Image: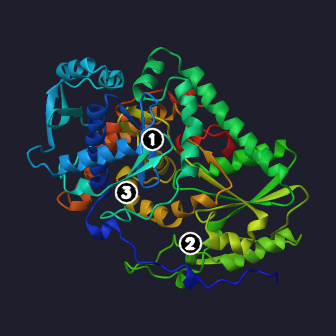
Amino acid sequence: MHNVPSFDLKEFPLEKVSDPRNEKITRTQLLSEHASFSFLLTSLYNQEFGSLLRLEHSLGDGLYYIDSNDKVITPEMISTLETKLRALLADDSLPLVVGTKPHAELVKIFSKANLQDKIGVLKAWQDPTIPTIQCGDFIDYVLEPMSTNKKRLTIFEFRPFLNGLIARLPTMLNPTGINEWRDPQVLHKMFSEYSKWAKLLNVESVGKLNQCIANREIHHVKMVAEGLHERKLAKIAQKLANNYPAKRVITIAGPSSSNKTTFAKRLAIQLKVSGYSSVVIEMDDYFQDTVKIPYGPDGLQDFEHISAMNVELLGERVKALLAGESIPVRRFNFKLGEGVDYPDQRFKLQDNCFLILEGIHGLNPLLLEHIGREDVTPIYASALTPLNIDYNHRFPTSDYRLIRRIIRDNQYRGQSPRLTIRRWTSVRVGEERNIFPYQHNALTFFNSSLVYELPVLSVYAKVLLSEATQPAPDEDPDSPETKDVSEEARRLLGLINNFYPLSPEIVPKISCIREFIGGSVLDE
């Protein structure tokens, strides 16, 4: 037996938290409220300060904006914005109205305002009439459902951040309030590192990326994007090598469809280049037996909570490996609902060998303490796209990952897009409870997004999402859940239709994209 810190799982209870499945506020509704809020905020900023407010990316529970002319947004400006916005939201004489405009008329409006990125979107969107949203003199096209309920939009908080501002909004776990503030510096660093290159390549918006495809310049963009991944992996591997043998354990955590599997394989290759081997343990093999997994507030067993893992056993075996001992291979038998050891299949860490632990709890402090924080380099992997549709419409990171998952589930698991969409809310709830609160524990990170990826994914996604807009034969077409899935499929299809398609043949066989579309040499 090895000395493992003693913890009481009561310190990590299955806390009662808001769940959108109980609050009757769907993910689609929340996104529609965020979209309407952004429309009003950016329109007001332009009116008040004569400059465009650019939505850079999501950041924690909010949206991060900067001035498009790199002007510092001062606390006084933020205060003015909040006063004006709250007055607008309280003015019943200026409702939010969803309608349509002729395509040509909307092009004229955007041309007069010199909004070239919006004109670029309309090049790919050639319907004769375009859905719009208006509030007084403010007008924009509608890319996804928009909320017209101004009362719900009053739930927000502004915070200065760097040279811009963060608009903090309701989340899936707190749809009726604003969460306690957490500094989002780690997430911002992940976004900004790749965004700088997207801007240098002049492909930070969908319109510019489409133009790059049309001009046959995309091969250069692809090579730079893949080269950045390779350089980042090499840097991480070198950092790990520099800390050997003090930190022989690597934990990799991240949300769904963030490329954890491909990242782990490519990291192992880079470690090999540096003269080190690695052994991978899937943390899912250290689930508690199903009968021991606790029930949550909803009356269902919570398989994604840290208490569903046998952290004591995993911690004990990691300590044994670090002490030079061997341990049995362990697999979780999902049919039996229990973990099974194979005593005749044992392994140990050889010289110059790292131990990689992959699973959603790789950043959780309870797990890190059981392993021994001093022995671990926790890594956070995610997919944070630098692409904006235009200056005030982002391509949501969670939608990016959902599209990846829809394609992967269909390719490898025979799962319909509608089923993946239906389960996504539960996946997102689990991420917000069990992954995102611990991002700050990561000592390094990997952003798996590739700026040219969505045009490739669109080749698959347009077909799958088009099919998903209609209920399956075994669904009740009149049930609220069925209608929500259809609406979500239409929303995602509308977003993906903004991209010019790009042949999958362009994608290198070792690329992170291959985890979802197939053809990776890493699987051979």
Q: Point out residue 388 in the picture as x, y percentages from the top left corner.
A: 42, 34
The residue at which mark 2 appears reads as 334
User: Mark 2 falls on what kind of element?
Assistant: loop
Q: Is residue 278 left or right of residue 200?
A: right
Q: Is residue 441 left or right of residue 22?
A: right
Tell which residue pokes out farthest to the front in this image.
76
User: Mark 1 falls on what kind of element?
Assistant: strand
| Residue at (41% x, 64% y) in the render | 179
Q: How many marks?
A: 3
Viewer-nearest residue: 351 or 95: 95
The residue at which mark 1 appears reads as 164
Whether residue 506 is visible, yes or no, is: yes
| Residue at (29% x, 48% y) in the render | 82
Quarter of the view holding residue 373: bottom right
Upstream in sequence: badge 1 or badge 2? 1
Viewer-nearest residue: 51 or 235: 51
| Disc sitting over residue 507 in the figure | none
Upstream in sequence: badge 3 or badge 1? 1
3 vs 1, front mark:
1
The residue at which mark 3 appears reads as 419
Mark 2: amino acid:
Phe
Mark 1: amino acid:
Gly
Q: Point out residue 524 in the picture as x, y percentages from the top left corner.
A: 69, 44
